[in-house]
Amino acid sequence: MRAHLVLVVLIAHLVSFASSLSQGSLVVDDNGTQLTYTDSGAPSGSQSYTTIFAVHGMGFNGGIFSKIQALAPTRRFRIVAVNRRGYAGSTPLSTFEQNVILNGTAEQRSEFSQTIGVELLMFMDTFIQQHDIPVFNGDRNSDGGVALLAWSIGNMAGLAAVAHIVDVPEATQSRLAARLRTFIMQESSSNALGLPAPPQNWVPLDISDPTIPAAHQYTAFAQWVSAYFDHGNLSSKDPNVISWVVPSSFTPFTVFNMSRSQYDSIVDTTDNPALDADQLALTSALEANYRASNFNSTLRSILPHMENWFITGTRSASFGPYCIWVVEDDNAAAGGGFVNFKTIDGVNHLMHWDFPELSVSVYQSMIFS
Ligand SMILES: *[C@@H]1O[C@H](CO)[C@@H](O)[C@H](O)[C@H]1NC(C)=O
Ligand SMILES: *[C@@H]1O[C@H](CO)[C@@H](O)[C@H](O)[C@H]1NC(C)=O
Ligand SMILES: *[C@@H]1O[C@H](CO)[C@@H](O)[C@H](O)[C@H]1NC(C)=O
Ligand SMILES: *[C@@H]1O[C@H](CO)[C@@H](O)[C@H](O)[C@H]1NC(C)=O
Ligand SMILES: *[C@@H]1O[C@H](CO)[C@@H](O)[C@H](O)[C@H]1NC(C)=O
């Protein structure tokens, strides 16, 4: 009897949790290209709030942000999780676009990358106009404005957006410039920045290990990338202290903390992750976007409020802890002060699933500083 009651309460909780997010889709160009999203909504009452546009990674759609979305209203945030092309009902990449990714000329590839960035900018601008998203008043202790949170391979899209702020209509540019206060690069890999991975790099995909059956490689990736790793002393910045391949035996992988229905609605093992991996070959466009978004003073002055952050967890899959060193070095080489850094103790690549309260606090500390 008691167990039944608990079950009923649990189901009621899950239903209210799921239904508190609204879903939608915005057209982002003249061709009818659509990006779908979920929205935690404006906090109730007339309180002010800050909007976070969150961009998911490879093999996990925007549903991976649902736990932080559930917390958003109580923390004076509105979190909009946008699904990149192909994921969760967003317009798939066309055959032409797929051919450009694999076989296009350098110019076609950089146009493609620009298109992805412009689509995300148009998405944010359309959302801002439809929902009357408040501007940022320049006081970093105040609510208002927007943050862009790009996670994992979603950094390809986030960086493309910031880098192409000069390629959208002037009205869009000025609405975004008046609002964009923080750009958070969470757990990018170096190759999503167009930069090489070190020789030790390994992923459970057939590019690293051809014995992994192609049909199961993205299932393997979703498991591995959600594991916890026991790295050595990361302050040493020595690639050899990173556990490149084997996860910890002592902490369950994040995917093991998903119910079957959560897993089925969030984890994507179709062609979408494969198309993401293909885009890593757009190295020169990716690197140009990374350098422009972070280290080009002219571009940064067009977004005068934007503070850039690069964050990773101490127990994340190899590429995150490695990549933060690369960006730290580039920041120093550029004279310093372009990017802020934070390493979060004890969390892994999917911090926002396993530690939603902590994650919102981490984002808050960056958005309000
Ligand atoms: C619309 O699609 C055509 C053909 O696929 C393409 O050439 C054009 O660049 C697209 N326009 C936009 C705004 O994306
Ligand atoms: C790309 O070109 C290679 C040969 O250069 C060819 O084998 C492959 O089918 C092409 N792929 C696409 C998607 O056009
Ligand atoms: C970790 O590495 C840093 C930098 O090399 C060093 O200063 C520190 O003593 C090391 N910590 C431990 C526990 O070995
Ligand atoms: C995930 O972890 C949290 C916190 O440990 C727990 O409350 C929740 O029940 C877990 N969910 C699943 C689906 O295992
Ligand atoms: C910096 O960005 C501006 C604006 O997009 C561009 O005109 C300029 O060429 C860039 N500078 C460098 C060194 O790439």
Image: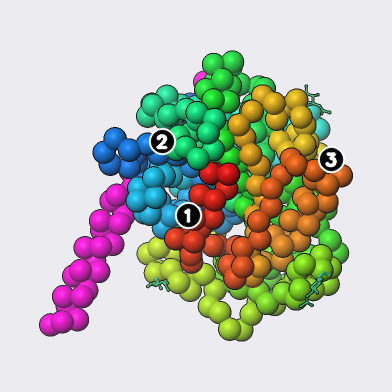
Residue 235 falls within the magenta-colored stretch? no
| Viewer-proximal residue among 192 and 218 | 192
Q: Label 3: few (<14), some or many (≥20) within 10 Å?
A: some
**Residue placed under numbered mark 1 in the picture:** 360
Question: Given the image, on which type of amino acid does mark 1 rest?
Answer: Val
Say the numbered circle drawn on residue 334: 3
Amino acid type of the residue that numbered disc 2 sits on in the rendered structure: Ser
Tell me the residue at 31%/55% (across/down): 18
The answer for how far apart the CA atoms under marks 3 and 1 are is 30 Å
Give the camera-side residue of 27 and 2.
2
Q: x, y (%) of residue 100?
A: 71, 36
Going 36% across and 54% down the picture, which residue do you hit?
A: 70
First in sequence: mark 3 or mark 2? 2
Q: Quadrant of residue 1?
A: bottom left
Picture residue at 65% right of the left edge, 33% below the top: 162
Q: Residues within 10 Å of mark 1 (few under 14, many from 20)?
A: many
4 inside magenta stretch: yes
The percent position of residue 332, horizontal first and vertical second, equals: 83, 47
Tell me which segment is drawn in magenta.
1-30
Residue 360: image x %, image y %? 48, 54
Q: Look at the picture and state if 254 lies above or below 89.
A: below
Discs 3, 2 touching: Cβ within 8 Å: no
Q: Disc 2 marks which residue?
A: 25
Which residue corresponds to the image point at 62% horizontal and 35% vertical from the top-left? Answer: 306
